[in-house]
Image (cartoon, rainbow, N blue to C red):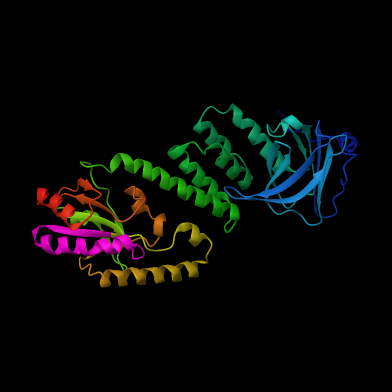
Amino acid sequence: MRTLLFPLLLLGAILSGCSSSENSGGTVINVHLEQANGLSANLDRITIAGEKEMLRSAPIDADGNFSFAFAEPLPDGLYQIRVGAQKATLALDDADGTVSLTGPLSGLSAYDIEVDGSATAAETVRVMDRIQELGGLEEFEEMIGEVENPYTAAYVTFMSLQRAGEAGVDLHRAAIQRLPEGDQNRQNYAAYLGELEKQLAFMKSQELIQPGQPAPDLQLKNPQGETVSLSDLRGQVVLLDFWAAWCRPCRQENPNVVRVYNKYKDQGFTIFSVSLDGVDDSQAARLTPEQVEEARETQRQKWAAAIEQDGLVWENHGSELRFWSGDASAKYGVRAIPATFLIDREGKIVEIGLRGAASIERALQQIL
């Protein structure tokens, strides 16, 4: 595939049937697709890992020509042309005036098209075409590092590495950092990466969080803002307890936990409570930093009040105040609460999922 600049005479002949080929300060996209006559075309603005917004629809004439014209320049970003089942996503720059595309209809999805009038869109086509020739992540990283437009780099990385798993995380993160601050693409992509990292952490936890395995350390803030660490309790038998003030089953279970604590606290037994109160990352992305801080403070107060109300008198209480978005729950593979992990004096997991005073007590008696 080659990306070429059209000779002006050839361009005029090809686009003679388009409804608009003159740029008056806005953006005009003229397209000629062989064998597309009789169909209709759509232009969408898209965001990475988000929804698309249809901007224009246009009929295609008998010669395969159609056009999208805008009085104002289209802002920097990603745009998708759709014709039937064929589609191509291109980055555009707000300095682009008249952009021309040509090629066979069957070549649209394969990026077998030629571009004139937009160096940014031409770069997208070149990169998407080149992907098919790459042999692995090292070649991909080298290629994506040469891409000038951040939207093209981010889109190509997102589309290409969705199945790369942990090996692609650093490349995803680098692509996100290149996008402008506050851009919806950056926000959506960051949210996608956050979910991906949680999934990867959960899968890893299924291998690591088993009886006999070392308990991963946790370092969290207590309601007073001080750091509490699970590893500081080494030498004691610890019940790691995931709960939340809003969780009714957790609150109903708390009297059992308190009963066991009071009975065995003088025999080297303690509890490390992890609260899943707070504001999740997706909600936080829709709020201003001030609103996030206010919402998390409200959640902190509810958490502190529940500790007092339920008589959870041990010292080790921690939370990220991120609801289900926190790293602690992902690290231990927690998807429902209450969730408990009994840890011995050497810091190894002994039991998982203990519920009720009798169940906890039986397990404790075997260790203490």
Frontmost residue, 313 versus 154: 313
Give the percent coordinates (x, y) of residue 179: 58, 51
Q: If the image is split into quadrants, where does the N terminus sit?
A: top right
Residue 290, compared with residue 205, is above or below; it is below
Frontmost residue, 249 versus 43: 249
Residue 248, compared with residue 234, is above or below; it is below
**Left or right of 278 in this view: 348:** left
Give the percent coordinates (x, y) of residue 305: 31, 72
Indicate yes or no whether the magenta region holds residue 119.
Answer: no
Residue 321, visible in the rendered structure: yes
Indicate yes or no whether the magenta region holds residue 247.
Answer: yes
Give the percent coordinates (x, y) of residue 157: 56, 40
Magenta highlight: main SS: helix
Magenta span of residues: 244-273
Residue 167, compared with residue 191, is above or below; it is above
Give the percent coordinates (x, y) of residue 316: 23, 63
Residue 224, visible in the rendered structure: no
**Left or right of 178 in this view: 310:** left
Residue 256, compared with residue 167, is above or below; it is below
For image coordinates 60% across by 43% down, the residue present is 155
**Left or right of 184 in this view: 224:** left
Residue 304 placement: quadrant = bottom left
For image coordinates 16% across by 55% down, the residue present is 358
For image coordinates 53% across by 31% down, the residue present is 139
Number of numbered labels in the structure image = 0
